[in-house]
Each structure stands twice: as C-alpha cells, then as structure tokens.
Image (tube, helix red, strand yellow):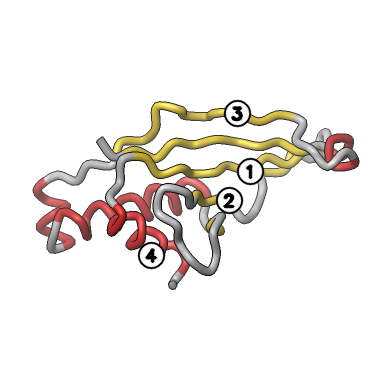
C-alpha cells in the first residue's frame, strides 16, 4: 500500500534560541492512502503516472509549496518534503511546518513525485 505519512515540527521563539523544536511528532503516522482507481488510470494514462500525480496533488493541496530534503537530487527511500511557509500562531510567535514522508512507493514513482514537486 502506498501512503504519505505526515509529521510536524513546531518552533517557538524560545526553542529557536536553543536551536531546537518546541514540539514535533506525527499528524498522521498511518498515512494518506494513494491508490488510483480505474478512472485515475484512464485520466493519467498509466497506474504509475496516476500514482505520481495523485501523490503530488495530495501534498500540494495540503500545504501549497514544499521543498525536498534532498535537493537537487532525489534519493528514493530517503527524501521527504517539508512545507515552505510555516503556519504561524501570532498569539505566541510559534511556527509549525508539516513534512510528508513517502511509504510503499516504487523507486520510479518516488523519482516521478520528486520531479513533479520540484520541477527537476
């Protein structure tokens, strides 16, 4: 099963002074399932192309832009994607970012998702 697991990291002004996170963990450790149906496969031309498009869309729709942990080259099985613009809590100055971890994707699918999200 292909999934995208979602973690978070929160930095406060105090934790930033220490060079650390105030809090971190999983938003969704089970992950968002990415399994194309017959209509998706027909729309994108192949199951692999549908998987790549759906995974990239899922990540983009959740947070907008992301940056890859391994840039400018993808290392399948090791690359994750982190939200570019943190969610800011103006009441306490904290900033929270989400990261997206691919699980169960083939090497070619991971390379395709990387290309789709980074333009490389």
- The residue carrying mark 1 is 97
Tell us which disc is closer to us: 2 or 3.
3
Q: Secondary structure at mark 4?
A: helix
The location of residue 21, given as percent across then percent down, is: 75, 35
Is there CB contact under 8 Å for labels 2 and 1?
A: yes
Choose the circle earlier in sequence order: 3 or 1. 3
Q: Which quadrant holds the N terminus?
A: top left
Residue 30, located in which quarter of the rendered image? Answer: top left
Q: Secondary structure at mark 3?
A: strand
Choose the circle earlier in sequence order: 1 or 4. 1
Choose the circle earlier in sequence order: 2 or 3. 3
What residue lies at 34% left-to-right and 38% top-to-bottom? 3
Distance in Å between CA atoms under marks 3 and 1: 11 Å
Q: Residues within 10 Å of mark 3 (few under 14, many from 20)?
A: few
Q: Which quadrant holds the C terminus?
A: bottom left
Q: Is residue 37 above or below residue 72?
A: above
Q: Is residue 39 above or below residue 13?
A: below
- The residue carrying mark 4 is 116
Is there CB contact under 8 Å for labels 3 and 4?
A: no
Name the foreground residue: 95 vs 16. Answer: 16
Is there CB contact under 8 Å for labels 2 and 4?
A: no
Quick check: 25 left or right of 5? right
Residue 25, located in which quarter of the rendered image? Answer: top right
What residue lies at 16% left-to-right and 52% top-to-bottom? 40
Name the foreground residue: 90 vs 114. Answer: 114
What residue lies at 81% left-to-right and 37% top-to-bottom? 12
- The residue carrying mark 3 is 25
- The residue carrying mark 2 is 83
Tell us which disc is closer to us: 3 or 1.
3
Distance in Å between CA atoms under marks 1 and 4: 21 Å
The location of residue 78, given as percent across then percent down, is: 47, 49
């Amino acid at each position: 099963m292909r999934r995208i697991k979602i973690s978070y990291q929160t930095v406060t002004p105090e934790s930033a002074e220490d060079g650390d996170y105030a809090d971190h963990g999983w938003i969704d450790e089970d992950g968002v399932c990415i399994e194309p149906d017959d209509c998706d496969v027909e729309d994108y031309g192949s199951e692999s192309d549908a998987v790549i498009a759906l995974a990239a869309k899922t990540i983009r729709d959740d947070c907008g832009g992301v940056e890859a942990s391994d840039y400018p080259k993808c290392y399948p099985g090791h690359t994750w994607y982190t939200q570019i613009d943190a969610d800011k809590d103006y009441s306490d100055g904290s900033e929270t970012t989400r990261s997206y971890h691919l699980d169960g994707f083939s090497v070619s699918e991971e390379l395709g998702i990387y290309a789709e999200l980074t333009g490389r």
